Image (tube, rainbow, N blue to C red):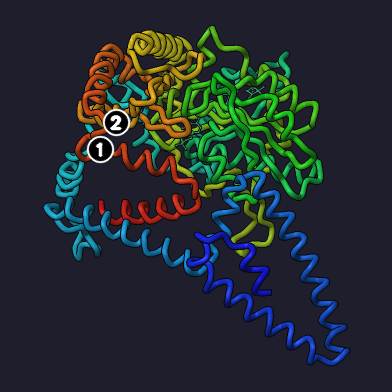
Amino acid sequence: MTTAYSAMMTPGMESALEPALKLLADHLIALDKRLHDARPSYVVIGAGVSATVAIQAFYYLLDLRKRCRTKGALWLFFESVKALPIVKGLIAAERGKMIAEMDADMSKKLAKEPPRLTSLPAKGMSVDAVLVEAAQRKRKDLEWTPTGSLMSGAVYMADDAHFKMLSSVYSSFAHSNPLHGDAFPAVVRMENEVVNMTATMLGCSPGGPNPNVCGLMTSGGTESILTAIRATRDYSRDVRGIKAPEMIVAISAHAAVYKAADYFGIELVRVGVDENFRMDINAVRRAVNGNTILIYASTPGYPHGAVDDIQALAAIAKRRKCCLHVDACLGGFVLPFASSIKPFDFRVDGVTSMSVDTHKYGLAQKGSSVVLYNSAALRQYQYTAVMDWSGGLYISPSQAGSRSGGLIAQTWAALMRMGREGYQRVADDVIAGANELRAGLSEIDGLKVLGEDVSMVVAWGSSDPSLNIYTVNDVMVKKGWHLSVLQAPPALHMCLTSANVASVRQLCVDLAIAVKETRALGKGKVDGGKAPIYGLAGGLPDRGTVGDILKDVQDLMLKHV
Ligand SMILES: *Cc1c(COP(=O)(O)O)cnc(C)c1O
Ligand SMILES: *[C@@H]1O[C@H](CO)[C@@H](O)[C@H](O)[C@H]1NC(C)=O
């Protein structure tokens, strides 16, 4: 036995693995001895038990193979190595040290702040005092600027009057709740109208391939996506009998699909993108199987602004009888007004659900999105009916129970104020901005634009191996810019909005300077820059450990505020 183990080991591994392997060998030798001493009846029982164990092991390996397929062989390697106690200990120690350093660093930054409240004030304050205190606390927030913003995405509107109108409509409906439709019919009707107007904008028409679109409002893009995916899972279970659901997503799909897979027990099958960063159609064709409940496409995807080929994907979905979700969270209120974009919505036969964020280019305040389905039958799968609750018969159409009528009303107000003409104007502006930025980037030696789709997101990377794009970003941060940082491949992007589109010329000027400054640094770094962290996090092959560290960092971010 011992010889078999030594033959397996390479010299380098020996020292680290030896204690663990010795432990295992001792167990096996002891087991061997016990079997020799056992009575025949025990051996029979033992054989039964081991058969069961063998079957379990077979399923385990099958599952492992599947997970390797979705997560990669490296994942298996790291998971196996990390299972060894000694490796576990080493990683935990490193992780602990790193987090402790960050913890100390972050608490130092807050040393001058007044202490946080930890219990309710004994006596309530006056209204005026609360308002003063709230205004005080707002001082450190980034100021909302109607124009000339240096931030990618984030705040999409650029009109003070619009902003004030939303607040006013919100406050007059803030107390209402569509769960109690008999008491608050106004917001129930507004929700119906928001959904209807959005569906019509996205190609639902009586003569079209999807005349029966319906939907609901949610709290945001992620909830719309979660809701649509859960409904699709349950629909596919009932109608197609799928018990081990899989969904096919591109590596450019929004992080919300990982949440959905995790929450709802769906296997995430990731496929690559083509040279223009669109979902790889041939890879999808190969990945579809009898357990595929859903193909998930984006118009555009958040990282590169690439618009997936919905017509080609719909053809696959129809042939294989699976659903097709179009994530138009970002593009829903822009692409319908962009003449260069092929049909991507309910004009296409085979699209079964869509997510559209009213709180992005719909120009409502945060906490608002729309989820749409091609049929009422599919929408019913997002409902929850409770028949046996002592609180009474209960039906809720959404993940949330109570919802804010104020959020519905302010969304309705945004759509009413903008109208088709208003959204057309915004779309024209941001797409013109994207074209200007693409042209500007092409003039900068060392940078290259990623992909050819002209949407409102423009991504660029470095075309020169000696130019670190993350260091370019650090220089840009010093100049006041908030660009989005991408990985695999390393890149940056700017999501153009009415608030920042006037800054495109400045962006090109500053980028050209930043590239020069980065080159002048050589291998040097910007003080306090994040380039080393991005570089490290992107390069670590052990994604599980990166995830664990991210969770620790999240703890710190919730602690040091
Ligand atoms: C913003 C966005 C989402 C959802 O994000 P939320 O923060 O939950 O609103 C989903 N998909 C894409 C492409 C997005 O840009
Ligand atoms: C919009 O309202 C009309 C009129 O009530 C209705 O026929 C249609 O089905 C609705 N469409 C959606 C998408 O809700």
Residue at left 71%, top 31%? 375
The residue to which callout 2 is attached is 471
- The quadrant of the picture showing ligand 2 is top right
For image coordinates 28% across by 21% down, the residue present is: 515
Q: Secondary structure at mark 2?
A: helix
Q: Which mark is residue 529?
A: 1
Q: Is residue 85 above or below residue 45?
A: above
Q: Mark 1, residues whose alpha carbon is within 10 Å: few (<14), some, or many (≥20)?
A: some
Asked if one can make out residue 162 in the rendered structure from this viewpoint, the answer is yes
Q: Nearer the viewer, residue 416 or 494?
A: 494
State the residue in front, 243 or 382: 243
All told, the count of numbered labels is: 2
Q: Amino acid at mark 2?
A: Thr
Whether residue 306 sits left or right of residue 310 in the image: it is left
Picture residue at 81% right of the left edge, 46% below the top: 241
521 on left or right of 77: left
Note whether 409 is above or below 130 in the view shown. Answer: above
Q: Quadrant of the N terminus?
A: bottom right
Query: In the visual, does 517 lie left or right of 52?
Result: left
Residue 200 in picture, x, y percent from top left: 60, 19
The residue lying toward the viewer, choosing from 406 and 56, is 56
Report crowding for label 2: few under 14, some 14 to 19, many 20 or more residues within 10 A (C-alpha): many
CB-based contact (under 8 Å), mark 2 and mark 1: yes
- The amino acid sitting under disc 1 is Gly
Q: Earlier in the sequence, mark 2 or mark 1?
A: 2
Q: CA distance from mark 2 to mark 1?
A: 7 Å
Image: 219 above or below 91: above
Is residue 372 in view? no
**What is the secondary structure assignment of the residue under circle 1?**
loop
Residue 449 in which image quadrant:
top left
Q: Residue 358: image x %, image y %?
A: 47, 28
